[in-house]
Image (cartoon, rainbow, N blue to C red):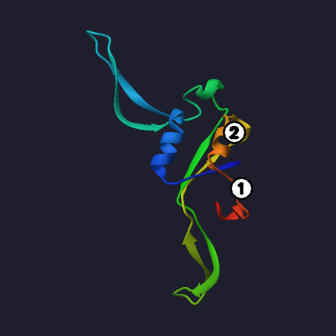
Amino acid sequence: MIYLKFDNRLQFEMVMDDYFTRDTETDPETGEVTEVGDKYMIGPWKSDTHGLKARQWELWVRGVLSAPTGETTTDDEGNEVPVMENLKGFHVDLDPKLGSHDIEEWTEQGYIQDPTNPQFRK
């Protein structure tokens, strides 16, 4: 799994723009094609992204993640529970077994993360 972190969702959408698409409509008289609606993430079953065959890549948008602070608190039932805090950034996981991308660019720009404790990604 490749873990990517962006400053926010907008940056994620800009950097990974080719993983998104929009629906189109064709004018029956002129043949002009225009995009309609909001853009959405392309499913691996819908498109050959980066020249790959269908089902060769998959993305999981995690959004804002949280991790334990190391402190604990007590819930309403008296159970000890970890105190959680939101991690900075907007997080996305890319399955490298299903495909590839030119990740060198992402590495150079600091998007690829190497979490020391990925178990919080449940």
The amino acid at mark 1 is Asp
Residue 82 on image: x %, y %: 62, 79
Residue 59 on image: x %, y %: 60, 43
Asked if 43 appears above or below 91 in the picture, the reply is above
Q: Residue furthest front?
A: 108
**Quarter of the image containing the C terminus?**
bottom right
Q: Residue at x 25, y 9 (%)?
A: 29
Q: Which structural element holds mark 1? A: loop
Would you name the residue on which mark 1 appears?
A: 114
Quick check: can you spot residue 80?
no
Q: Which structural element holds mark 2? A: helix
Total numbered circles: 2
Q: Nearer the viewer, residue 102 or 109?
A: 109
- In the rendered structure, which disc, 1 or 2, sits on the residue that comes first in sequence? 2
Q: Nearer the viewer, residue 45 or 48?
A: 48
At label 2, counting other C-alpha atoms closer than 10 Å, the crowd grade (few under 14, some 14-19, many 20 or more) is few
Q: Are marks 1 and 2 in contact (CB under 8 Å)?
A: no
Q: Residue at x 28, y 12 (%)?
A: 28
Asked if 65 appears above or below 100 in the picture, the reply is below
At label 1, counting other C-alpha atoms closer than 10 Å, the crowd grade (few under 14, some 14-19, many 20 or more) is few
The amino acid at mark 2 is Glu
Of the numbered discs in the image, which one, if any, rests on residue 104? 2
Q: Nearer the viewer, residue 76 or 91?
A: 91
Cα separation between marks 1 and 2: 14 Å
Q: Residue 91's quadrant in the figure?
A: bottom right
Q: Residue at x 55, y 88 (%)?
A: 77
